[in-house]
Structures are given as structure tokens and as C-alpha cells.
Image (tube, rainbow, N blue to C red):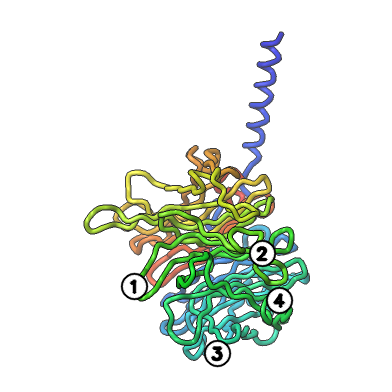
Amino acid sequence: MHRLHTACAGLILSILAALASAGDGVYDASFGNHAPGVSIIDVVSNPAISIDSANAVLALPDGNLLVGGTTVRASGQPGELSLVRLDASGQRDASFGDGGKILITPAPGITSLQLGALLGDAAGGVHVLASGVVDHVNRLLLCHVDAAGTVEGACVNLPAPAGLNFRFGRAAATLDSQGRIVTLAPVGIPTFTWGQDLSVARWHADGSSDTGFGNNGATTIRRFDELAGQTTFNTVAGVRVDTLGRIVVAATSRPRSATIDGVSTFAAARLLASGQPDAAFGDGGARLLPTPAMLEAAALALDADDGLIIGGSHLVNTPTSPPVLQSAFALARIDADGNIDSGFGDAGLRRVVFRSGMQPDDACAALAIQPDGRIVAAGYSRAPGSTGGFDLAATRLWPDGRLDTGFGGAGNGRFIGPIDLADGFGNLDTIAAIRWHDQRLIAVGSARSGYDQDEFVAIRLRSDGLLDAGFE
């Protein structure tokens, strides 16, 4: 009888598992435009040049998706911010803007334009953070788009902290519980210096400074360690607000001077809601990952315990002559007290290589944390073959940093998605942003389709890491 009960229980579990698998990711004929699980969006068609690069995705209150990035549509002309709204079936929502898209020039004559963040508001509109260069000066700009896809007024030129200029490079932003906008951007003194600092600032929804935050609206993070007199070059990875309203920052930090070009590593800091450093976090409010490895941070996520997950790349030069730079996904966890979680991965660092038998050239650009605590990291992986290029890539870890081998279709915890639109031109297929939405993973990036032709790409993965065939 015991054996019969055991056999029946095993049979029931097998049936349940089969049913769950059978119902997961079935074809949805109303979703998508390219292949099962994949949508390709040519923002502006121009056979001469049309370079669309997506690096942000926002889930809207009505279930639609807003994909954002930049578009270059004329040779020798600066780029524009580009937003495309997809409906729940993955098609362009023609009711948004001009046939489902809008293009924004945030300031006359702006060049080197980058989209920093898409932040939704209660009315279904979106704040758009951008950075670029106007008259040889780096700018940080905030635009607002309403739910119909109309840019409301002029974009606001956000001022740098007193005595500092914004520097060229990536910026990031998030919202606090009151709907205020918290930005993270690189800054430095107007004259040349080897170092670069980071400014955390808070703004009201209209772009005016929240002068009660930090020092007249901003706090400058000058370094992430306590080595007196050391100059560091710090770049933005991400900014988040935790469950207690504290502001958490992740960055790459590298010692740098006229005689020193040190090893870069992951860095983190936490500010109180007032903008003051949180002395209860790490070493006086900041923490560096102590490792001899060269690390470059690209993404930040917070887990349910307010721990920090930092994702990026682990870089190693081979001992060959000449040396070859190898790159792999790298993730680390810092707990809510600012301590390195040595139980995460291998002594605090998880390194993931996607392909064996070739030089690894993989980079993590985005993170998402599922409701069950599992961590999804996404970016790109070097494709094999003579034409080279990159494929979309993602992996999933358990909360303690172990590889989740149930993710992906190969039983090794890895998803590799070649889009392969640009036969003969080398495929440059990359993921730049990922988020958990409607019990599945939505990732966006870009895919090369020809010479001077890149398109927005959006993919949906089932929670098991397979392409959702209902998304195409």
C-alpha cells in the first residue's frame, strides 16, 4: 500500500508538472511581429540610415509597455529620444503619439544624446531623463510625455550642483514614494581633473529642485572608500529607493591619477531620505567590493531584504602575448547593513560564462528580481563564427547566487537568443533592460539589421527562461 501511495503521488506530481509546462508560453497569435517571443521595431524607416537603440522599458498601468531609447535617422545629424508604445499583444499602439511612436529633441543642437530613465506617473504619463552635450557643455534634461504621447512643454535643463559641471556619461533615475525624481549623474569641477564624482539629486515632478534634500538639493559622492587623498573615477550603474525610503547607489569606482590607473570594482553607497550619508551602511555610508578582479558595474536591483544586487562584467587579460581581454557576467550582493555577502556565489562574487570552447566575451547590462527572489541578469554574449557579433543573453540565479539550471532550454541556466537580422554585417544583438511583468520577463535592446540599420528589439521570456511563443 505504501508503494502504491508513493507511485500515485509521483504520478500526480508528474501530471501537474506536465500540465504546467503545457500551459506555459503557448502561442498567442495576437502578439508580436517577427518570431515567437520576439518583436522587432523599426522606429523610423530610412534605407540610408536608421539606428534605433532601446535601453529602457516601462510597464504602464493599463498593461501596455513603453520602450525607450535613441534614434539616428539622418547621416551627420544628432540623434533623438525615441519612445514606442506596445499594446498587450506586442504590436505598436497606434493611438500613442505618431502611429505608436514619438521622437523628442530635448534641447536645440544637442549631441551625444543618451536616454537615462523612463519613470511613470499616476496619470499614465512618463518622465524621461536624458543627457547630452549642448554648446560643448554636458547637460541633464527632464522631459514629460502625457499618456497620449504628447510632449508637455519644453524639457527642463536640470542644474548641476554649485561649482560642478555634469560630465559625459550615463545617468540614471528612480522615483521615491512621494513621486519625487531622484537622479544619479557624473559630475566634476569645470577644469580638468583625473577624477569624477557622482551627484545624487532630488527634483519635484515639474523639474524644480527639492532644496531640502542634501546640500541645496544634491549630495555629491566623491569616493566610495576612506583612502585619504585618493582620486577616483566613478561612473553610474544605478539608483534605487529601498523600502525605508533610503537612496541606494551603485557604481564603478577606479583609482585614477596622472601616475595611477587602478583596478575598477563594484561600489555602493546609501543616503538617508534627507540626502545625508547613512552611517549605518558599510564604512561611513559606502562600500567597495574588495577583489583583485577588474569589475565594471552596469545595473542595480534591490531584493526583498533591501540587499543590493550589483551586476556588470568581470574583465581579465589572458597571460598571452599580446593579452586578450576576456569578459564574463559578474554579480555580487551587499546586504542591508552594507556588508559583502560572502555566501553569495563564490566568496561574494558570481561569474557566469555563456559559451565554452571560445574566448568569453559576455557582459551583463540589466537585472530583474522575480517575486520569488530569483535574480535574472541579462546582456549579450559573443556569437561564434567568422562574422562575430553578439547574441542576446540572460541567466538566472537563486537568491544565494547559485546558478538556476532550470532557466533556459539547455538545462544549464543560460538563455542565448540570436536574432540574426544582419546576415553579412555581423549581428549586434544586445539586451539593455529587463523587468518582471505579468508573470513573465520582458527584455529590450537592439538588433542589427544591416549597414547603419539597428532596430529596437523586445522579447518576452516565460518564467522558465524559454522564449514565450505567445509573444511575437
Amino acid type for the residue under numbered disc 1? Thr
Disc with the residue nearer the chain's start (3 vs 1): 3
For this orientation, the residue located farthest to the left is 321
Mark 4 or mark 2, whichever is nearer to me: 2
| Image location of residue 123, percent across then percent down | 77, 71
The picture quadrant where one finds residue 97 is bottom right
Q: Find the residue positioned furthest to the front.
A: 228
Q: Is residue 201 above or below residue 349?
A: below
Q: Position of residue 49 (x, y in %)?
A: 43, 76
**Secondary structure type for disc 4:** loop
Closer to us: mark 3 or mark 2? Answer: 2
Disc 1: which residue: 259
Q: Residues within 10 Å of mark 4 (few under 14, many from 20)?
A: some
Kindly identify the amino acid type of the residue bearing the numbered disc 3.
Pro
Q: Which mark is residue 213?
A: 4
Q: CA distance from mark 1 to mark 4?
A: 37 Å
Labels 1 and 2: the sequence-earlier one: 1
**Measured Cα–Cα span from mark 1 to mark 2:** 33 Å
Q: Nearer the viewer, mark 3 or mark 4?
A: 4
Residue position for label 3 = 108
Residue 366 pos. (x, y %): 54, 58
